[in-house]
Image: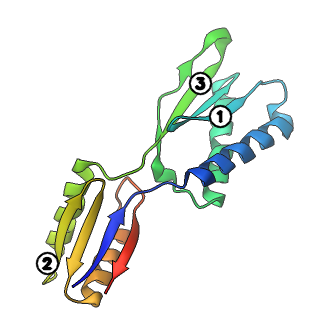
């Protein structure tokens, strides 16, 4: 029986590289001179800080450009609200989401069942969903449907076996 796993993972090394590139860029760009803008990777989050909300928004754009260039999905970022810090500065934290939570796994299971493809079964295994089927074409149809669905988390399809 053929199967594959639906997972939501983040390559932390690529995130770290993107944050480092963004930090280097904001230290050299003219429009960030004197704003004392800062970006750093923390445990499961990215912290951004700048002198004004406008500079913070520009900092977000720089970070998102670097993440997209490194093929890290922007759906994996969970943006917090903009907070005011001491000295009139602005701060924002973007959490990194990895893994499929129980609500999302139920949604994926329901979507696969609603496709009505004969011989397809789903099973939640921790933070991933295993999809089993008799035919390879049916599994590829499920992958195409899940890619077309607009879920709020990035999905990867791993461990495809015939």
Callout 1 environment at 10 Å: few (<14), some (14 to 19), or many (20+)? some
Gap between marks 3 and 1, in whole Å? 12 Å
Q: How many other residues sit within 10 Å of disc 3, few (<14), some (14-19) or many (≥20)?
A: many
Q: CA distance from mark 1 to mark 2?
A: 46 Å
- Callout 1: SS: strand
Q: Earlier in the sequence, mark 3 or mark 2?
A: 3
Percent x, y for residue 50?
A: 69, 25
Numbered tag placed on residue 94 in the rendering: none
Mark 3 or 1, closer to the camera: 1
Of helix, strand and loop, which one carries label 3?
A: strand
Give yes or no for contact between labels 1 and 2 (Cβ–Cβ under 8 Å). no
Q: Secondary structure at mark 2?
A: loop
Q: Quadrant of the N terminus?
A: bottom left
Q: Which residue is mark 2?
A: 116
Q: Relative to residue 105, is residue 63 depicted above or below?
A: above
Identify residue for label 3. Answer: 91
Location of mark 1 (residue) = 40
Left or right of 158? Residue 69 is right
Kindly indicate the quadrant of the structure image that contains residue 2. bottom left
Calculate the distance from the C-alpha at mark 3 to the C-alpha at mark 2: 47 Å
Horizontal side, residue 79 vs residue 113: left or right: right
């Amino acid at each position: 029986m053929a199967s594959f796993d639906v997972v939501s993972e983040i390559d932390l090394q690529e995130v770290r590289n993107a944050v480092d590139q963004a930090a280097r860029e904001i230290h050299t760009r003219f429009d960030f001179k004197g704003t004392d803008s800062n970006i750093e990777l923390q445990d499961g989050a990215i912290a951004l800080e700048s002198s004004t909300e406008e500079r913070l928004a520009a900092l977000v754009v720089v970070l998102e450009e670097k993440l997209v260039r490194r093929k890290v999905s922007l759906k994996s970022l969970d943006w917090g609200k903009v907070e005011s810090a001491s000295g009139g500065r602005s701060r924002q934290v973007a959490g990194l989401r990895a893994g499929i939570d129980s609500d999302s796994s139920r949604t994926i299971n329901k979507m696969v069942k609603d496709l009505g493809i004969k011989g397809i079964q789903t099973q939640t295994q921790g933070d991933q969903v295993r999809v089993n089927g008799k035919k390879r074409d049916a599994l590829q149809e499920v992958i195409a449907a899940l890619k077309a669905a607009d879920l709020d988390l990035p999905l990867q399809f791993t461990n495809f076996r015939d």
